[in-house]
Image (tube, rainbow, N blue to C red):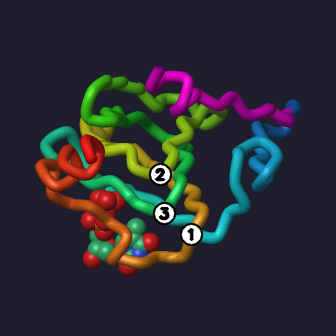
């Protein structure tokens, strides 16, 4: 099942009266060692980002502010996750197609990745992705 392969992760809130504190440790709260961090902001509800699958990279997506949605598919099943809490994330393993959309104006989408960036490991053509998934 896709939802078992792409679990929602809940992170511990170590906050107190001074404010919130969320800690994510590689290979502990998420299933991989973190090699790269990037974040997406300034998107809105008119854009769709992502639209690719990765042969090598695993990701965790977290809206540390605002909200967005991610549509995840393996070519057969589809899952839509609303990311709307700094304490929740979704794990996306290799070879899963993803689209991020419906960004709120204040959305800051943090992405943790298991690899350094390599544009060659991206599949950006959905037909090509489906072909690879069927072979
Ligand atoms: P893109 O993959 O289109 O972003 P997203 O899938 O998150 O919508 O990336 C936009 C540009 O940034 C593209 O030219 C590749 C570059 N990029 C890097 O150089 N390093 C990275 O880690 C990422 C995610 C993108």
Where 82 sits versus 113, above or below?
above
Whichever of callouts 2 and 1 sits on the residue coming sooner in the sequence is 2
| Residue placed under numbered mark 1 in the picture | 115
Q: Residue at x 61, y 32 (%)?
A: 88
Q: Residue at x 54, y 76 (%)?
A: 116
In the orientation shown, which residue stands out farthest toward the front? 135
Viewer-closest of 129 and 36: 129
Ligand 1 closer than 8 Å to the CB at disc 3? no
Q: CA gap, disc 3 to disc 2?
A: 6 Å
Q: Are marks 3 and 2 in contact (CB under 8 Å)?
A: yes
Ligand 1 closer than 8 Å to the CB at disc 2? no
Q: Residue at x 58, y 27 (%)?
A: 8
Q: Is residue 1 left or right of residue 105?
A: right
What span is in magenta? 1-15
Q: Secondary structure at mark 3?
A: loop
Q: Are marks 1 and 3 in contact (CB under 8 Å)?
A: yes
Viewer-closest of 108 and 91: 91
Residue 109: x %, y % from top left: 45, 49
Q: Secondary structure at mark 2?
A: loop
Residue 17: x %, y % from top left: 86, 31
| Residue placed under numbered mark 3 in the picture | 56
| Number of numbered callouts drawn | 3
| Mark 1: few/some/many CA within 10 Å (<14, 14-19, 20+) | some
| Mark 2: few/some/many CA within 10 Å (<14, 14-19, 20+) | few
Residue 40: x %, y % from top left: 39, 58
| Residue placed under numbered mark 2 in the picture | 94
- Is 6 magenta? The answer is yes
Locate residue 99: give its quadrant: top left
Locate residue 32: give its quadrant: bottom right
């Amino acid at each position: 099942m896709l939802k078992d392969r792409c679990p929602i992760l809940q992170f511990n809130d170590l906050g107190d009266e001074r404010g919130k504190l969320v800690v994510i440790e590689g290979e502990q709260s998420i299933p991989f060692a973190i090699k790269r961090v990037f974040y997406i902001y300034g998107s809105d509800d008119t854009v769709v980002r992502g639209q690719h699958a990765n042969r090598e990279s695993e990701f965790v997506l977290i809206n540390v502010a605002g909200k967005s949605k991610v549509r995840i598919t393996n070519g057969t099943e589809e899952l839509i996750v609303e990311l709307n809490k700094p304490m929740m994330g979704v794990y996306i393993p290799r070879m899963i197609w993803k689209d991020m959309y419906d960004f709120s104006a204040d959305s800051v989408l943090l992405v943790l990745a298991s690899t350094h960036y390599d544009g060659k490991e991206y599949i950006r053509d959905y037909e090509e992705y489906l072909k690879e998934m069927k072979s």
